Amino acid sequence: MIKSFLRFIVISVLIITNSCNSPTEPEPLPGRRDYLWKVDTINPGNESLYLLRLWGSSPNDVWAVGSSSSSTTSIWHYNGKQWQCDLIPRRVAPYGLFGFSQNYVWLGNSSGFNTIWHYNGNNWYQFAELIPEEGYHSIDISNFDGLKYNDVFGVGIMRKYPTEKYEDEEYKGLIMNFNGFEWKFLKIPEVKTQFTAVAVDPKSKDLVLAALGMTPERYFLSQVYSWDGKELKELLSDIGGSTSVTKLGNEIFASYSSKIYKYENKSLILWKNNHGTPMNGNIICGRSRNDFFLSANGGIAHYNGSDFNIIYKTDPTHQVQILIGLLFKNDVFFIEHNFTLGRNLIIHGTLN
């Protein structure tokens, strides 16, 4: 009887111990590189257009939005065959774009419109008018992210009325949350910066934020912060360049100049250093740490878990900028600004 009881205790301890030790996550598979490429030109007619964001529910349902000289040409949609604009005038200057499905998409504005729009599968409509805090006059929502439809975060900047001196302009970074019913400002410490991108860590639920600030000497300051609901922590700050934060599978990565960092335990750990190579841009999208894309001198580079390689080459005689990407199982889309031609291009790759 005693032996049986002891055997039961040993077995129970083993079961409890094993259940507390989570299994090691498998190494992500290497990403493929056999893409077939095509390029579409977004034609806004006589209007100027600068596309900023991409989001889609499938390769046959992709949105591209940006700043335009006319609101009628600021929102574009791809149906799997062609890019179209409905030419409907709206009080929008699109900046942030994010969704969960074909009939659930968020749109954030800049230019002091102080509004957030929503797409319900049929129409875009103004969902909320944001009221700035006392003494402030304008709100820009530059990016969204979330793990579920009733817990979405929007980030950006809140500005005060301009003073006589531009250098005295007052502003602060802002974080908003949608709880399934309404958008609310989160109470965070005041920092004189603009949050430009956000990624929600699926494990810790922390927010990792790219930001753009300015030194007293008027130099641009690239920054990365984390926010855990209590502490807003600066993780990186450097003069010049730009930062990005990207979710690769269940992991968060930040990139600045030629360096790629991994977010772990509320810190950034240097993961890859591409200094001195053409791979000196930010991560623009990815499926995992072994399958992601980044901007590079000469085109779009890919990392497959072993090495970096430029898999899409841009015209070396043209001045171009690869801004952002969007991934599906077999398809990838990128925004290219071709300043030489004065055009917005959509680069579409499909695995062979």
Image: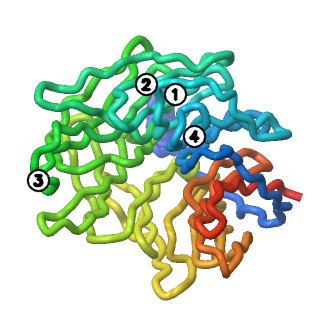
Whichever of callouts 1 and 4 sits on the residue coming sooner in the sequence is 4
Circle 3: residue type: Lys
Q: Is residue 84 above or below residue 320?
A: above
Task: Name which residue type carries label 4.
Answer: Val
Residue 256 point in image, percent of width and height: 40, 67
Q: Give how far apart the Cα atoms at labels 1 and 4 are.
A: 11 Å
Residue located at (44% from left, 44% from top): 199
Residue with the mark numbered 4: 65
Check disc 3 and report the residue beneath it. Answer: 165
| Residue type, label 2 | Ile
Q: Earlier in the sequence, mark 4 or mark 2?
A: 4
Q: Secondary structure at mark 3?
A: loop
Residue 123 picture location, percent across and down:
63, 17
* Residue drawn at x 44%, y 40% as measured from the top left: 143
Lower position in the chain sequence, tag 1 or tag 3: 1
State the image quarter where residue 73 is shown: top right
Q: Nearer the viewer, residue 320 or 33?
A: 320
